[in-house]
Image: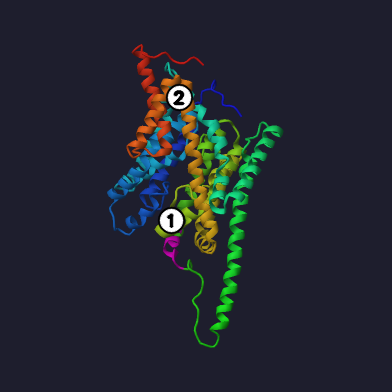
Amino acid sequence: MTTVLAASPGLDFSRTQQLTVVALCALTAFVSHLALAVFNDGVRPFMLDFIQGRTTRTATTAVSFGLSAGFVFGLGAPMALSSGVLNPWLLFLPTDILGLLAPRKWLAPLLGGAWGAVVVLGLDGANRVAHDLPVDFLTAMRQMSTPILFLFTLFPVLAITRQFGRLRGGIAAVLELALVIMTLKLWPTVFAGSLAMAAGVLLLIAFAIRKDLLQRTADRAAALAAGEQTAGTGRVEPADDPMASLFSAGALRLRRFLPLFMVLGAGICVLAQTHIFGGGEATSFLIAKGQYGEAAQVDFYRVFGFIPLIATTALASGAYGIAGFTLVYPVGYLMPNPFLAAVAGAVVLALEVLALSALGKVLGRLPSVRDSSEHLRAAITETLGLAILFGSLLAAQVMGGGLAILVVGGLYLLNEAMGRPVVRMAAAPAAVIVGGVLLNVLHWLDLFTPVKG
């Protein structure tokens, strides 16, 4: 797979697409205002104190802004400008903040809708201006697509190695490499990592379930032995059901607003069906290439890394994820029309909310599966962090040679030395944009000649 730099991504949306984005941003801001759902997983644990009145709206907004701003401007905006596809960091993190910030219910959707209008109207203008500059750093940023797509394929291998050791990790690595080579050879038009990621995730789940089943068998045997020793003493052992009632209040709160969650699911699924939105870094570039089936596959695999986190934080806090478990993304990509997408999205999010309590109990009995989720999230972050950094340096090479690499790499290292005021994953794309602006200024001062590609 090669990255084509000749075709500049466009952000010129149709009127229907613009209205969809504005309406959905208004809705997500309203849901955030009600403290029913937020997109940022790091903010969700703080929502319980806000819901129960132990902290103020202003303080919760400050937490949301502090945890989200770097992703919005360092990752969401650069990814949208470089791929031509919107993403959840650009749309939903700001509506988290605006919804919590609004002091009145009626103001929250107005602020959210205004942000949606800024995105759909402002990004296209910024995109056109940037492509007309002597140093076209947005086109150069498309170099990020190949490292992101291929290195992302390895996240199941990292998760298996960390959880189950080198031998099983090595087996997974060899299997994934063989599947990538086979896909490139036999199906060159298909994303090469599709089969490899599927095999890796299935291996990880199989290893985790096997370990849990073996452990439960051993625990039963130990319990039977202990029961024989205590027979006749009259002692009653406590039931082994630690998740039975822990999260009931959070689940009941979310169920009371089930119709609103169904509308939310319908809106997000319709946005995904328009194919102007991608749920992840790799997905954005696949959507831009028109590979919707592969995009659905990638986002489906990501779900396994986030279900336990989203489920447990939602049940504990009483606030769900804006996109739920994000299953509405792949469902939307594959829908043939927006009407079916709306129905499917509503059904998916309704089923998720209704299943939360049962899912919490199941996860309580499968500790290895919960651990797999944590390893998957860490592996996704690690692979994407390396891919984005490497892709950003490739973009620097394209737009300005050694000087651009010095500027972009230097800004990234400076951010590290300063304690990461910009989160690591967003630092490199932000450095490319800052470096591109600086190179254009140097060109206007007759101190730099753009690289001819």
The residue carrying pointer 2 sits among few (fewer than 14), some (14 to 19) or many (20 or more) residues within 10 Å by Cα, namely: many
Task: Return the residue nearer the eye: 296 or 409.
Answer: 409
Residue 96: image location, x then y, percent: 38, 45
227 to 440, vertically: above or below: below
Q: Which residue is depicted at the point 32% across and 37% down?
A: 418
167 to 288, vertically: above or below: below
Q: Is residue 343 visible?
A: no
Q: Which residue is depicted at the point 50% across and 82% down?
A: 236
Q: Which residues are magenta?
A: 245-254
159 to 368, vertically: above or below: above
Residue 238: image location, x then y, percent: 49, 76
Query: Which SS class for mark 2?
Result: helix
Q: Which residue is depicted at the point 64% across and 39% down?
A: 177
449 to 36, vertically: above or below: above
Spot the residue most to the top: 446
Is-magenta flag for residue 27? no
Residue 385: image location, x then y, percent: 47, 38
Task: Return the residue nearer the eye: 127 or 160.
Answer: 160
State the residue position of label 1: 313
Quadrant for the N terminus, please.
top right
State the residue position of label 2: 396
Q: Main secondary structure of the magenta part?
A: helix
Disc 2 marks a residue whose amino acid type is: Ala
